[in-house]
Amino acid sequence: MNPAIIGGGYAGMAAAVTLAAQHIPVTVFESARQLGGRARGVWQRDTQLDNGQHILLGCYHHTLNIIQQVGGNIERDFMRLPLQLTLYNRFELKAPRLPAPLHLLAGLLTAHGLSAGQRLKAVRFILALRRIKFRLAQDITVIELLRAHKQGELIRLLWEPICISALNTPVHKASAQVLLNVLRDSLNGTRADSDMLLPRLDFSALFPDRAAEYVKHHGGKVLTACAVEEIIPQGDEIELLTAQGAHRFSHVICAASPAAAARLFRPVPQLAPIAAQIEAIPYQPIYTVYLQYPQHVRLPHPMLGFDQCYTQWLFDKGQIAGQKGMIAAVISAEGIHQELEHEQLAQKVALELNEQLGISEVPLWHQVIAEKRATLSCEANISRPTHTTPLTNLLLAGDYIQGDYPSTLEGAVISGVRCAKELLTLI
Ligand SMILES: Cc1cc2nc3c(=O)[nH]c(=O)nc-3n(C[C@H](O)[C@H](O)[C@H](O)COP(=O)(O)OP(=O)(O)OC[C@H]3O[C@@H](n4cnc5c(N)ncnc54)[C@H](O)[C@@H]3O)c2cc1C
């Protein structure tokens, strides 16, 4: 078997590591000069940042395991925060050190910013979800589910921020079943499963770069700046065309971003229906506003949210990664912020930091990174392609492939590992 992988993002590199671990000589083609795809390091004014601030959950077992498999150390590579949600001056939930799910229930019962009635409603909702084992008979939108459980004000203070962070999709569109899958694994698992993990390294260094070393060490190849331009089925093999020439493989896992996968599939008659399915997928944006303040500026917590502001979540990269004075503001999913120029958006965020937290210093510089197609829009009953194709030696991996998870690192890694394991059954 000589398999190839198209795409060196988290899905593609997870597939490559899984094959390399079994001494399969795998070749990875990555079109960019750098690995990581939608989770990659970028340099701005001599500062190592990411194309967007990311966060992992303790229940992302596949991602955490594979990072360790290639030499990462979770406690060193991440700042671990026990479950806590702070909307500055408005709402605070902190889970006490109790076994799960008592930590969550106790956290809800002692949350600041909620009336006694609201706390009970939140607890009843969680207990109702446990009774149905986090499984709905029929998918509906998150807002429909929350209204059916009379969550009222809790929607804005608790569930909407959680839904937007987890699914990057507004509650009136988001799939209730996918949200329940994430709540099942994070809030209803062990206490560590609900921890939030904030990276101290950039996202290329965290996994894909280490994965490339691992693959090379196990006899594979990782070719960057080497885009696959065409997929040509040739009998039992598949030919991949690149600017450097044609290469033949026994099997291919296509882990390119959805738009790129659709472009590659469209001209191949057997794959054109999958291309059409991928092209119909809606996307959601994520904006990250990086503000470099003087070094003494810090937030009251490493991560905190704002209620009813442009800014949704703030991350103090000084406390998290030693980058003093660097604040990352994240604005997930579609919204009115998209109507602003980047310059105006950066000014709005700085103004909110001043109004809410009294940070009156002027940022020394700022950088807005708008990822317009950050994730798929994880809507109720959306049709996502499966990992198989009509060509038995061509599989499909990525965060948009059918599965329990929304478009996340964990969804990407699960799908990459799954494709690799399927190839391994053929040996
Ligand atoms: C700003 C932002 C914030 C996010 N925040 C979070 C978060 O907090 N937590 C979380 O879990 N997830 C988050 N996500 C989502 C997460 O980054 C993605 O789900 C994940 O990175 C997708 O990985 P992937 O491998 O499926 O796809 P991609 O990362 O898109 O990888 C595909 C790769 O294929 C390459 N490629 C494309 N065409 C070709 C070709 N023709 N030949 C060769 N290579 C090709 C691309 O260059 C790319 O490297 C965020 C995403 C963004 C953009």
Image (cartoon, rainbow, N blue to C red):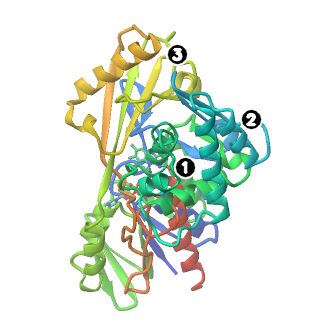
Identified at 32% across, 27% down, the residue is 367
User: Does residue 46 appear in the picture of this structure?
Assistant: yes
Q: Residue 97's image quarter?
A: top right
Q: CA distance from mark 3 to mark 1?
A: 28 Å
The residue lying furthest to the right in this view is 98
Instruction: Give the mark nearer the N terminus: 2 vs 3.
Output: 2
Residue located beneath label 3 in the image: 298
Q: What kind of residue is marked 1?
A: Phe
Nearest to viewer (mark 3 / mark 1): 3
Q: What kind of residue is marked 2?
A: Pro
Q: CA distance from mark 2 to mark 3?
A: 25 Å
Q: Is residue 141 above or below residue 111?
A: below
- Report helix, strand or loop for mark 3: loop
Name the spot of residue 149 as percent of width and height, x first. Answer: 53, 53
Q: CA distance from mark 2 to mark 1?
A: 31 Å
Nearest to viewer (mark 2 / mark 3): 2
- Left or right: where does residue 189 sit relative to residue 129? right
Residue located beneath label 1 in the image: 207
Instruction: Give the mark nearer the N terminus: 2 vs 1.
Output: 2
